[in-house]
Image: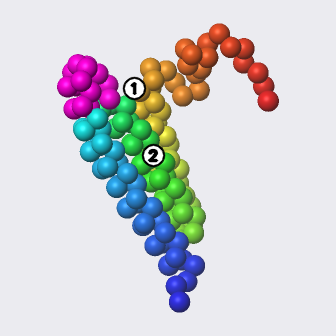
Amino acid sequence: MIGDWELAKHVSEWIEIVAIAVIAVSVLIAMVVGARDAFEKDVAAGIRSIKRQTGRGLLLGLDLLIAADVIRTVTLQPTLENVSALGVLVVVRTFLAWSIVVELRGRWPWQLGEEYADEPVTES
Protein backbone atom coordinates (compact mmCIF):
# COMPACT_ATOMS: atom_id res chain seq x y z
CA MET A 1 0.00 0.00 0.00
CA ILE A 2 1.27 3.47 -0.87
CA GLY A 3 1.90 5.79 2.05
CA ASP A 4 0.71 9.39 2.19
CA TRP A 5 4.16 10.75 1.35
CA GLU A 6 4.64 8.41 -1.59
CA LEU A 7 1.20 9.32 -2.92
CA ALA A 8 2.00 13.04 -2.63
CA LYS A 9 5.29 12.49 -4.44
CA HIS A 10 3.61 10.60 -7.26
CA VAL A 11 0.82 13.18 -7.55
CA SER A 12 3.32 16.04 -7.75
CA GLU A 13 5.35 14.19 -10.40
CA TRP A 14 2.24 13.53 -12.49
CA ILE A 15 1.20 17.17 -12.23
CA GLU A 16 4.64 18.16 -13.51
CA ILE A 17 4.30 15.74 -16.43
CA VAL A 18 0.87 17.18 -17.25
CA ALA A 19 2.33 20.71 -17.08
CA ILE A 20 5.09 19.80 -19.53
CA ALA A 21 2.54 18.15 -21.84
CA VAL A 22 0.25 21.20 -21.68
CA ILE A 23 3.10 23.52 -22.65
CA ALA A 24 4.32 21.24 -25.45
CA VAL A 25 0.84 20.67 -26.89
CA SER A 26 0.01 24.37 -26.71
CA VAL A 27 3.15 25.20 -28.71
CA LEU A 28 2.19 22.63 -31.36
CA ILE A 29 -1.37 23.97 -31.51
CA ALA A 30 -0.01 27.52 -31.69
CA MET A 31 2.12 26.64 -34.69
CA VAL A 32 -0.83 25.06 -36.52
CA VAL A 33 -3.22 27.92 -35.71
CA GLY A 34 -0.56 30.51 -36.51
CA ALA A 35 0.22 28.93 -39.87
CA ARG A 36 -3.48 28.78 -40.71
CA ASP A 37 -3.99 32.43 -39.78
CA ALA A 38 -0.88 33.46 -41.72
CA PHE A 39 -2.24 31.80 -44.86
CA GLU A 40 -5.86 32.91 -44.43
CA LYS A 41 -5.18 36.46 -43.22
CA ASP A 42 -1.60 37.71 -43.05
CA VAL A 43 1.71 36.95 -41.37
CA ALA A 44 1.07 39.44 -38.56
CA ALA A 45 -2.19 37.68 -37.68
CA GLY A 46 -0.34 34.36 -37.63
CA ILE A 47 2.30 35.72 -35.28
CA ARG A 48 -0.37 37.16 -32.96
CA SER A 49 -2.13 33.78 -32.90
CA ILE A 50 1.11 31.97 -32.05
CA LYS A 51 1.90 34.39 -29.23
CA ARG A 52 -1.63 34.23 -27.81
CA GLN A 53 -1.90 30.42 -27.89
CA THR A 54 1.64 29.86 -26.58
CA GLY A 55 1.08 32.39 -23.80
CA ARG A 56 -2.10 30.69 -22.66
CA GLY A 57 -0.36 27.31 -22.57
CA LEU A 58 2.58 28.76 -20.64
CA LEU A 59 0.26 30.35 -18.09
CA LEU A 60 -1.56 27.08 -17.49
CA GLY A 61 1.72 25.16 -17.38
CA LEU A 62 3.19 27.59 -14.83
CA ASP A 63 0.10 27.26 -12.64
CA LEU A 64 0.41 23.47 -12.71
CA LEU A 65 4.13 23.60 -11.92
CA ILE A 66 3.44 25.84 -8.92
CA ALA A 67 0.79 23.38 -7.71
CA ALA A 68 3.25 20.49 -8.00
CA ASP A 69 5.89 22.44 -6.07
CA VAL A 70 3.42 23.31 -3.30
CA ILE A 71 2.33 19.68 -2.94
CA ARG A 72 5.91 18.45 -2.85
CA THR A 73 7.16 21.06 -0.41
CA VAL A 74 4.24 21.05 2.01
CA THR A 75 3.73 17.30 2.19
CA LEU A 76 7.18 15.83 1.60
CA GLN A 77 9.84 18.17 2.93
CA PRO A 78 8.38 21.07 4.92
CA THR A 79 11.74 22.40 6.15
CA LEU A 80 12.39 26.13 6.40
CA GLU A 81 14.93 25.89 3.58
CA ASN A 82 12.51 24.11 1.24
CA VAL A 83 9.63 26.44 2.08
CA SER A 84 11.92 29.41 1.38
CA ALA A 85 12.94 27.88 -1.95
CA LEU A 86 9.26 27.34 -2.75
CA GLY A 87 8.60 30.99 -1.98
CA VAL A 88 11.32 32.08 -4.40
CA LEU A 89 9.98 29.72 -7.10
CA VAL A 90 6.45 31.04 -6.67
CA VAL A 91 7.67 34.65 -6.91
CA VAL A 92 9.70 33.91 -10.06
CA ARG A 93 6.88 31.98 -11.71
CA THR A 94 4.35 34.66 -10.73
CA PHE A 95 6.59 37.32 -12.29
CA LEU A 96 6.83 35.20 -15.45
CA ALA A 97 3.05 34.79 -15.54
CA TRP A 98 2.52 38.56 -15.12
CA SER A 99 5.03 39.21 -17.88
CA ILE A 100 3.14 36.85 -20.18
CA VAL A 101 -0.17 38.56 -19.36
CA VAL A 102 1.37 41.97 -20.09
CA GLU A 103 2.69 40.63 -23.40
CA LEU A 104 -0.70 39.16 -24.36
CA ARG A 105 -3.01 41.94 -23.16
CA GLY A 106 -0.77 44.99 -23.08
CA ARG A 107 -1.66 45.76 -19.46
CA TRP A 108 -1.07 44.48 -15.93
CA PRO A 109 -3.33 41.65 -14.76
CA TRP A 110 -5.07 43.83 -12.17
CA GLN A 111 -5.88 46.66 -14.61
CA LEU A 112 -9.27 46.80 -16.27
CA GLY A 113 -9.25 46.14 -19.97
CA GLU A 114 -10.40 48.72 -22.48
CA GLU A 115 -13.66 46.84 -22.91
CA TYR A 116 -14.48 47.61 -19.25
CA ALA A 117 -13.07 51.13 -19.03
CA ASP A 118 -16.47 52.88 -19.20
CA GLU A 119 -18.12 50.64 -16.60
CA PRO A 120 -18.02 51.78 -12.96
CA VAL A 121 -16.01 49.67 -10.57
CA THR A 122 -18.27 48.16 -7.91
CA GLU A 123 -17.23 46.45 -4.75
CA SER A 124 -18.90 43.17 -3.91
Q: Which residue position holds label 1?
A: 103
User: Label 2's element?
Assistant: helix
Q: Position of residue 99 (x, y in %)?
A: 42, 31
Measuring 41% from the left and 32% from the top, which residue is drawn there? 100
Q: Which residue appears farthest toward the top when viewing the image?
A: 118
Q: Which residues are magenta?
A: 34-49
Which is more toward the observer, 54 or 83? 54
The outermost residue toward the bottom is: 1
As drawn, the residue found furthest toward the front would be 40
Residue 30: % across, % down: 30, 38
Q: Quick check: 56 above or below 88?
A: above
Q: Residue at x 25, y 20 (%)?
A: 41
Residue corresponding to mark 2: 60
User: Is residue 37 a member of the stretch shown in magenta?
Assistant: yes
Q: Nearer the viewer, mark 2 or mark 1?
A: 2
Q: Is residue 41 magenta?
A: yes
